[in-house]
Image (cartoon, rainbow, N blue to C red):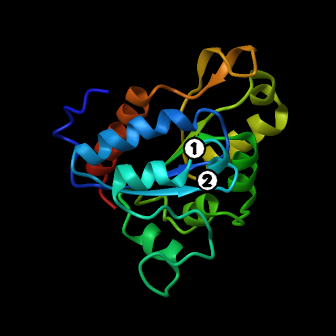
């Protein structure tokens, strides 16, 4: 991915991954963010670590991955509060059907939803990038949860359409890393034009 993003550097970016095959796309995004001089904290659910290892992101960021809500990375303090308080933006990608439900209903039993719950979305954008099988995406519960999250101040990215790992074809693919980067830039640009 082209990392010519001089207008997007020095930011504190949180990347949260939940358990989907599209986790592999996020490694390229994280690499680009780090090369553009951003400070990236990676959060992973236990399910996400089944698709890609924390070591991948630790190698890319030079920082420990927050993969347990019981882990204290830097010091013995509420890690989720520290990460949330210092962030400029958060992206949850891939955001599975299960993660959508957790976010919409205030469940904080994993590092991703825990940190998202500690962010003031009136000042710090939280972007959700849904990724799942096309039938799962079309379920009423998924659509209700997306509407709830939008009402709660989350930014919802549109899924892409195409071939899926489950051999289905349709809506539900995680956008490519370039599109995720554009979404981050757009949200930060919009944030800078809003006076709080």
Q: Callout 1: few (<14), some (14-19), or many (20+) C-alpha neighbours within 10 Å? A: many
Q: In this view, does 69 lie to the left or right of 184?
A: right
Give the labeled residue for mark 2. Answer: 152
For image coordinates 38% across by 27% down, the residue present is: 178
Q: Is residue 166 left or right of residue 7?
A: right
Q: Say how many tags the image has.
A: 2
The answer to whether 164 is drawn above or below residue 99 in the figure is above
Q: Is residue 104 left or right of residue 154?
A: right
Residue 48 appears at what percent x and percent y?
Answer: 64, 48
The label number, if any, that marks residue 52 in the structure image: 1
Return the disc, 2 or 1, that comes first in the chain's sequence: 1
Q: What secondary structure is found at the residue carrying circle 2?
A: loop
Q: Is residue 79 visible?
A: yes
Q: Nearer the viewer, mark 2 or mark 1?
A: 1
- Residue 105, image quadrant: bottom right
Q: Looking at the image, which is closer to me, 16 or 139?
A: 16
- Quadrant where the C terminus lies? bottom left
Residue 155 appears at what percent x and percent y?
Answer: 52, 43
Q: What secondary structure is found at the residue carrying circle 1?
A: loop
For image coordinates 63% across by 59% down, the residue present is: 113
The answer to whether 88 is drawn above or below residue 108 in the figure is above
Q: Do the residues labelled 2 and 1 touch (CB within 8 Å)?
A: no
Furthest residue in direction left, as rendered: 6
Q: Callout 2: few (<14), some (14-19), or many (20+) C-alpha neighbours within 10 Å? A: few
For image coordinates 77% across by 37% down, the residue present is: 142
Q: Looking at the image, which is closer to me, 108 or 54?
A: 54
The label number, if any, that marks residue 104 in the structure image: none
The answer to whether 125 is drawn above or below residue 172 in the figure is below
Q: Distance between the residues labelled 2 and 1?
A: 30 Å
């Amino acid at each position: 991915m082209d990392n010519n993003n001089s207008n997007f550097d020095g930011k504190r970016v949180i990347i949260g991954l939940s358990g989907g095959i599209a986790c592999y796309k996020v490694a390229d995004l994280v690499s680009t963010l780090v090369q553009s001089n951003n400070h990236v904290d990676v959060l992973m659910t236990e399910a996400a670590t089944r698709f890609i290892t924390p070591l991948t992101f630790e190698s890319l960021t030079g920082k420990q991955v927050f993969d347990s809500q019981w882990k204290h990375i830097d010091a013995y303090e509420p890690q989720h509060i520290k990460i949330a308080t210092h962030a400029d933006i958060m992206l949850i990608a891939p955001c599975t059907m299960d993660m959508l439900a957790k976010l919409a209903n205030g469940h904080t039993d994993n590092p991703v939803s825990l940190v998202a719950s500690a962010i003031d979305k009136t000042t710090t954008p939280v972007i959700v990038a849904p990724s799942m099988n096309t039938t799962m995406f079309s379920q009423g519960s998924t659509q209700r949860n997306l509407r709830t999250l939008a009402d709660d101040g989350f930014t919802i990215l549109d899924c892409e359409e195409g071939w899926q790992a489950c051999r289905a074809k349709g809506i539900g693919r995680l956008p490519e890393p370039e599109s995720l980067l554009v979404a981050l830039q757009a949200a930060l640009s919009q944030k800078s034009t809003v006076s709080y």
